[in-house]
Image (cartoon, helix red, strand yellow):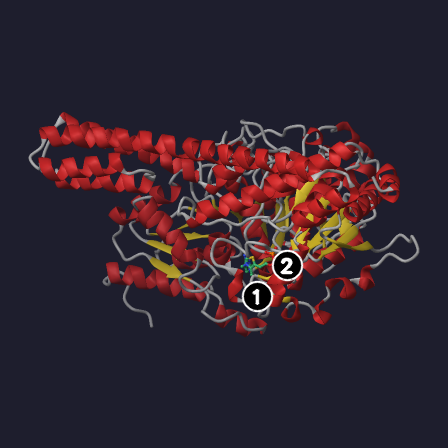
Amino acid sequence: MNKSVMTTLERLNLTVEEIVADYRLVYRSRQVSLIGRQEALAGKAGFGIFGDGKEVPQVALAKVFHKGDFRSGYYRDQTLMFALDVCTIEAFFAQLYANTDLKAEPASGGRQMNAHFASRSLDENGGWRDLTNMYNTAADMSCTGAQMPRIAGLAYASKLYRQLETLQAYPQFSNQGNEVTFGTIGNATCAEGVFWETVNAIGVLKVPVVLSIWDDGYGISVPNEFQITKQDIYAILQGFRRENGGEAGFDLYQVKGWDYLALVEVYQQAAALARQEHVPAIIHVTELTQPQGHSSSGSHERYKSQERLAWEAAHDCLPRMRAWLVETGLADEEQLAVIEAEEQAQVRAIQRRAWEAATAPLRQEAAEAGQLIQALADSAGRQAQLQDLGRQIVEEKSPNRKQIMVAVQDALLATIDEESPARQALIAWQQEQLTRNRRRFGSHLYSESPQAALRVPAVAPVYSPNSASIPGHEVLNACFDAMLAREPHFIAFGQDLGRLGGVNLGFAGLQEKYGPLRVADTGIRETTIIGQAIGAAMRGLRPLAEIQYLDYLLYCLQIMSDDVASLHYRTRGGQKAPVIVRTRGHRQVGIWHAGSPLAGIINLLRGMHVLVPRNMVQAAGFYNTLLLSDDPALVIETLNAYRRKERLPDNLAEFTVPLGVPELLRPGDDITLVTYGACCPIALEAAERLSRLAIELEVIDVQTLLPFDTDGRILESLKKTGRIIFMDEDVPGGATAYMMQQVIEGQGGYYWLDSEPCTLTAQAHRPAYGVDGDYFSKPNVQDVMALAYELMNEADPAHYPPFS
Ligand SMILES: Cc1ncc(C[n+]2csc(CCOP(=O)(O)OP(=O)(O)O)c2C)c(N)n1
């Protein structure tokens, strides 16, 4: 063996066996890609995406990935996942075939496309496993760049676990903050804003991240020329470089993706500094290729030139590593040929096993359905038609559940006028399968653990003659103080939250009391404020992330929707991020301080709870509930309640407000008015005035939009009144339409209506500035009165003659 190679191996602490084993893995991973693509193109998978051309840097990365570390990456990382055994090859194929057996496909139970990796942080009961004893991978998403924001938080957790004395008592989450977060991203995705926002946040937070950019020159068909200024991400990242071993900034590395030894060296250096000194690093891995093109959706010959294709063939990291092994004498042709033959055979055998495992249960279900349909044919009039249906489903080579359910329904429709035990048996089987499939594809949208928010016991507030009346912001301040005091994992951050204590002073004085790590300021970076919370929560912390105003939630709605809200669902209960997002809105003035885009929010955030407390005592009760629960939630405080005085409950730290339970604010017999948040005082004032006109409004505060009135209390009110108005400050057809659907359709309110159900909303435009702008943009007391009166006039014109 070449002497200089030997010296390098010694320096890097590498053995020849290890290198050959790495080559074996690189080759194996390539086989997975080749066979996987064939399987997808043969129609055995809906879609296939693979990590070919990116194998060698990933075996180098795997060497420095320790237990307790986290990966937040994307669909090209199969080799890293195989190296760490986070994903076995059998599990990779199971995911390709959408196998819904969680044991076979532990990342998502068949819910995610292939190459969407996830380790299981939670046990079967939703409790945390020892994260320091496993290789962790935050669950992948298909949206490019979505893996970035949470990197800031995953790494931030290491900083807190290292620096906060009180957290040393929780060793299942961290070994003194020694964990590194490894991010991966494609070159083209570096054109997205979320990349830059995250890089900046990591630099500001000074947290241990090693971020790899896999640069293969393209984003599907679009070359770097159209993606990145100067076509060179490394050049434009230079401003982030740490100067002369200083404190601020990143260490930047550039290395060729086929150069095994150089890669090992770079990863060793970067990971050691990140681990020991929390210095972040960016590694630009260049000259990577994509031998099979982007995915199974098309071929890259359509958009890459002959020259480029020839260049890729010459730089493909697999043959280059092979040639290097032979040239340096680390391995010989014969030895490599044996390895390759073994791997070809093994991967093929594993693929076949995975296909059998994925399809056998479906054939079994098809056989059961076929037999039941056959039995129905024997007892029914339309024998030939049913026999055909039964035979077709049984003979289907790789049936899916959709085909089975279609056949069962067709059989039931064909025998609609018959009554027989065979038909009853088929109906029973259909119902059982529907229940199973709903769970198979629908479970874990919310926590199902003993800490689920809906399981937190309600504890009523206690008042005594001594209970003080204080402004709303002081109520919250006392609440947050108590939360910080009793729960060491609870941390809070946001714009102006630290030194100032928040724009409405909810955290005033708490940074001084609990220190700048537990109550922290952040930059103006809504997406990565949420990312910081997601990552921290995935590592056992309990972050409250503040978004200064509701109107700015749109900046981070994407990541809340794609990551937080879907996390528990897309891992089928394997991961959770119990983030509390706090914001405030509704009742200030102007287009961007008084909006209420609730329908957008609740429709995008299924998987989170959305709470809309009308005052700060209710808000405090919700925060107490959330801290006891492991569900993520958004709390929207109402802007005009900070200065209003409220009585402080004596049991401020213990009382809880249950989710999904509306509160009756004022009883009445004539019309039910359903509302929430800042509309509550408006509804109450209108009710007071209407009472003088002999119209009694029953005012109900729903309090939480997600979940919505879980016990059907609004229906009980509607049964009494027969008339209902849904009111809020969203646009027409917004969250009022949702509330109407929940009550009229969901609770069966339709059957109790004496008048048409109404909505009272803001105008379709944004709220105009000023008192009058607000008055004519939002529903006001006079609007409520006019609508309520109109309903009564229609019902009883003699008693309620038209007044205008
Ligand atoms: C937000 C978003 N936009 C577009 C896509 C479609 N898409 C999937 S992969 C991809 C290209 C990504 O290129 P790059 O980041 O260089 O990674 P590579 O696939 O080359 O490894 C695109 C445009 C997506 N998944 N998500």
Asked whether mark 2 lies closer than 8 Å to ligand 1, one says no
Mark 1 residue crowding within 10 angstroms, few (<14) / some (14–19) / many (20+): some
Q: Is residue 580 left or right of residue 702?
A: right
Q: Position of residue 189 (x, y in %)?
A: 63, 60
* Residue at the left extreme of this rendering: 381
- Position of the C terminus, as image quadrant, is bottom left
- Name the residue: 90% across, 58% down: 243
Where disc 2 sits, the SS reads: helix
- Which amino acid type corresponds to the residue marked 2 in the rendered image? Glu
Mark 2 residue crowding within 10 angstroms, few (<14) / some (14–19) / many (20+): some
- Position of the N terminus, as image quadrant, is top right
- Residue 113 visible in the picture: no
Give the quadrant of ligand 1.
Answer: bottom right
The answer to which quarter of the image holds residue 428 is top left
Asked whether the beta carbons under mark 1 and mark 2 sit within 8 Å of each other, the answer is yes
- Name the disc covering residue 95, or none: none
- The residue under label 2 is 312
| Figure label count | 2
- Name the disc covering residue 304, or none: 1
